[in-house]
Image (cartoon, grey):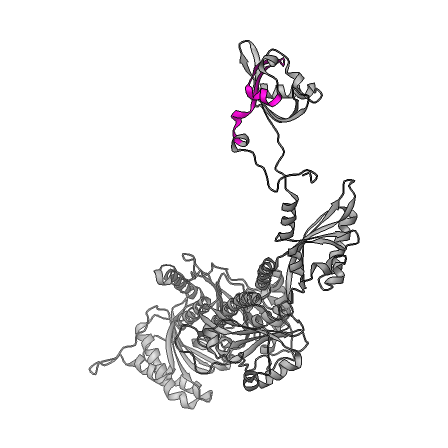
Amino acid sequence: MDPARDEPDGPTPSAPRDLLDASSDAAAVVTAQGVVLGWTRAAEALLGHPAAEMVGTSAARLLAAPRDPARVAGVVQRCRAGMGWNGLVPLRHRDGRSVDADLRVSASFRVGASECFLLSARERRRQWMIGQSVLDGFLTRSPVGMAVMDRELRYVWLNDTLERLGGVPREQRLGRRLSELLPGLQAATLEGLMRKVLHSGVPVTDYEYLGWSWADPHRQRAYSTSFFPLVDAGEAVTGVCYMVQDVTERWTARRLLTLVNEAGTCVGTTLDVMRTAQELADFAVPRFADFVVVDLLEPVLSTEGHGAWLTDAGPAPAQPVLRRAGMSSVREGCPEAVVRIGEKAGFLPPTHDLSLLIDGEPILLPVIDPSTEEWVTEEPERAQRIREFGLHSLISVPMRARNTALGITTFLRSLNPVPFQPDDVLLAREVVARAALCVDNARRYTREHTAAVTLQRSLLPQALSGGTALEVASAYLPADPTDGVGGDWFDVIPLSGARVGLVIGDVVGHGITAAAAMGRLRTAVQTLADMELPPDELLAHLDDLVLRLSAEKTDGGPAQGSMTAFLGATCLYAVYDPVTGRCTMARAGHPPPVVVAPDGRVSFPEPPAGPPLGLGAMAFEATEIELAENSLIGLYTDGLIEGSDGDIERGMSRLAEALTRSGTDLPTLCTSAVQQLVAGPQPDDIALLLARSHTLGADHVASWDVPVDPAAVADLRARATRQVEAWGLRDLAMTTELVVSELVTNAIRYAEPPIRLRLIRDTNLTCEVADSSSTAPRLRHARSTDEGGRGLFLVAQLTDRWGARYTSEGKIIWAEQEIP
């Protein structure tokens, strides 16, 4: 652009034919030796040479620049390769002037025996020139603010847009510096950037900052500024030009996105409703507000019922209660608050009622006036706090998620003098919406977790008793709530003959499904144990049950298709006989028990491990150990010994060490062992069942061999009666005499020898008759004409319990009477 020339005010474009139509180009055919074979009228028009002068002569004389053989050779080689060439070449007109031409050279071709090239050219014409008046109009009316500063950073020139953005008239700007006009607009930083451009000559582009202007002094705005050096003909920097744009909308959108993303990482880190509410308040202060309160509906904080207020469930409750769930302030201790965490809040901005929580939009009060009638009448105490702490602007956003009203979050400003604007409402709405989803997730999880814990605790034994055979104690530690309720269980089951069954198990998985499966398995074990099954057979039946449960949940049709498959469980079942002092046990994939002898020696007897329950088609084996008087046996789940390092063997060693403390009562020992092995929250439930063994001495047991002779019944009846009276149980003598008579008579009549009678005095008085047959007794009702068949019926009526169990030698028929 040449300002000295008198150019028109607008561009002078070439005709479309000149710009796009290649048929108007000058053309010539030249041999490889540079001889012109063909010359067009357009070529004559471009360079002034007629065809008669050029054909047969050398084309080299047309070049205005010095000859460059290397360049010519490169062009020829390229064209011979079939690619052609084009470039800017200065040519000489017939009148001697130089003509800048866009020259194209075609791929080589042959004309007769000669190698030839087609050359075409057009003159490169000057682009359209802008007039000074157009330039002045463009700079002055540009939508981008522009200014020119001298080396002292004083205004030399500025356009109308910058004058309008800053709100300072042009006359007041010229000759003065930015820091003198707008001291609050990061003037020092901006002038520092301009000095950097002056000294380095390197532009600074798209520098964003926040500030205000006299055009809008009450609202903070965002600007983007670029600085460029002004260079004269001698390459000296003579000043700085800067351009500025108002990018408040872009900055607000980016800030909104950034804060919402930050809220996603800071709010909802736990599945706790109160913690989530507090995280929302802490996130917003001081990023967005100076004081924030989060008030939730009371049902949201409750673990009973649905725990929410549905917005589409018909009329709302008459007086739902809001409680303070979280608050934060730039002032320590939140002195602005009228109520504290957990207290009834009940705050809604004046003139609004609880319908705001259901279908109301966010409330924006750019300026709070506590002297108005609404504040003085409805919120007098809060009005006083507003005046005291200078709370001047408010946004209240209802918290809703999944068509459920949860509460309301209120943001206030005091130290920050800028009032909330409509753009801030968008940000508040988005952040609260994110937090509301987290609160609703926490509410739903808490309700489900509470139900699972309640179910689990109701299915665990409320009281344990091992009679006189075992002193028992237990400890149960639930998993970390974030990992869900587990399926660990244990039980102590009284059996016939003063024996006691001990069982512990662990269901795979977490949640209500695992807790429910645990309850079903515990009930099944009690039922199977009551059938007097030995440990290995009991586990085999339990394995079949687990297989059926898995089939129910995986093949139950569409209604059950979404349920988690019940994969299995581990279990250990042991039966302790205080008469013999022996313990029979079997296990299904469960850790072995720990035994501490009276002298302090620790062992881990390992019955065959067996497969976990639910695999099927695999056998279980039982083993038998002897427990001395006052031996300690412990059953536990794997969570107790896994530890944070997952080293099972090390965990078993630590358990053995924890159980060897002497002089500690059993409940205290059980609790302290769990506390010593588990330092903090763990991902799995933990159960520990301890039992200290006691034996029944000879003074508690009496037995006699039974001859296979009906006449021996009277003698055995008399012996049993004398023994019962010797034990001081005269009140039970008559019933015992009848029971012995009936059971011994049936054994002599129907069973196989050897036959043996035994009386056991424990918490109950037990009468047992053992024989070698496997036929099961059957209780039946005799007809009035029958001469027999009433024996077992009488036994069942006169005793508390009766039954039969099978042994390796045969069976035992037993009956128990409660000792007064």
Please indicate, yes or no, whether residue 239 appears anywhere in the rendered image. Answer: yes
Counting from the top left corner in percent of width and height, residue 456 is at: 47, 72
Q: Which residues are magenta?
A: 20-47
Horizontal and vertical percent for residue 267?
58, 66
Residue 27 counted in the magenta span: yes
Q: Residue at x 53, y 33 (%)?
A: 15
Q: Is residue 715 magenta?
A: no
In the foreground, 474 or 102: 102
Residue 659, can we see it? Answer: no
Residue 86 x/y as whole percent: 60, 26
Compared to residue 421, the image places residue 89 above or below, namely: above
Image quadrant where residue 395 sits? bottom right
Q: Tag count in the figure?
A: 0
Residue that lies at the very extreme toward the top in this rendered image: 113
Quadrant for the N terminus in the image: top right
425 vs 234: above or below: below
The quarter of the image holding the C terminus is bottom left
Q: 102 or 498: nearer the eye?
A: 102
Taking the view exactly as shown, the residue that stands out farthest to the front is: 6
When asked about the image quadrant of residue 106, the answer is top right
